[in-house]
Amino acid sequence: MELFFYILIVVVLFIIIVIALKKYYEQKAKILLSLKNGICPSCGAFSDDVGHAIEYQILNNGGCSGVSDILYTCIKCNKTYFVQERAGGCCGR
């Protein structure tokens, strides 16, 4: 009977961890999409025709198959976001 409770606890903890990781990666993807659209996830400032609210700087270009390090900065609230993005295929093809 004790073994059943230990197994049940491990299964419940595993499910909680999987759900938490799923929510984390969904939130991370939502923030990245917001930054790419020119909207600050923190203060809600957005880029328009007059000016940009989000600036980005490529810190390390990963090349065709590598991962690029990009630093996004909101001009309004001065918050920075460090993002690693995977390249979208080979550059020369």
Image: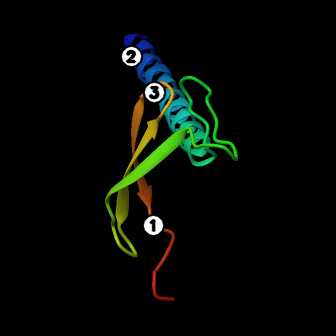
Nearer mark to the viewer, of 2 and 3? 3
Residue 19 left/right relative to 37:
left
Nearer mark to the viewer, of 3 and 1? 1
* Image quadrant assignment for residue 7: top left
Disc 2 marks a residue whose amino acid type is Tyr
Which residue occupies 58% across, 43% down? Answer: 52
* Image quadrant assignment for residue 39: top right
- Identify residue for label 1: 87
Instruction: Identify the mark nearer the N-term, 2 or 1.
Output: 2
Distance, label 2 to label 3, CA atoms, is 17 Å
- Identify residue for label 3: 17
Binning the other alpha carbons within 10 Å of mark 3 as few (below 14), some (14 to 19) or many (20 upward) gives few
Tag 3 secondary structure: helix
Distance, label 2 to label 1, CA atoms, is 44 Å
- Identify residue for label 2: 6
Tag 1 secondary structure: loop
Disc 1 marks a residue whose amino acid type is Ala
Nearer mark to the viewer, of 2 and 1? 1
Rendering coords of residue 89 (x, y %) = 49, 75
Looking at the image, which is closer to me, 63 or 12? 63
Distance, label 3 to label 1, CA atoms, is 29 Å
Tag 2 secondary structure: helix
Rendering coords of residue 87 (x, y %) = 45, 67
Disc 3 marks a residue whose amino acid type is Ile
Instruction: Identify the mark nearer the N-term, 2 or 3.
Output: 2
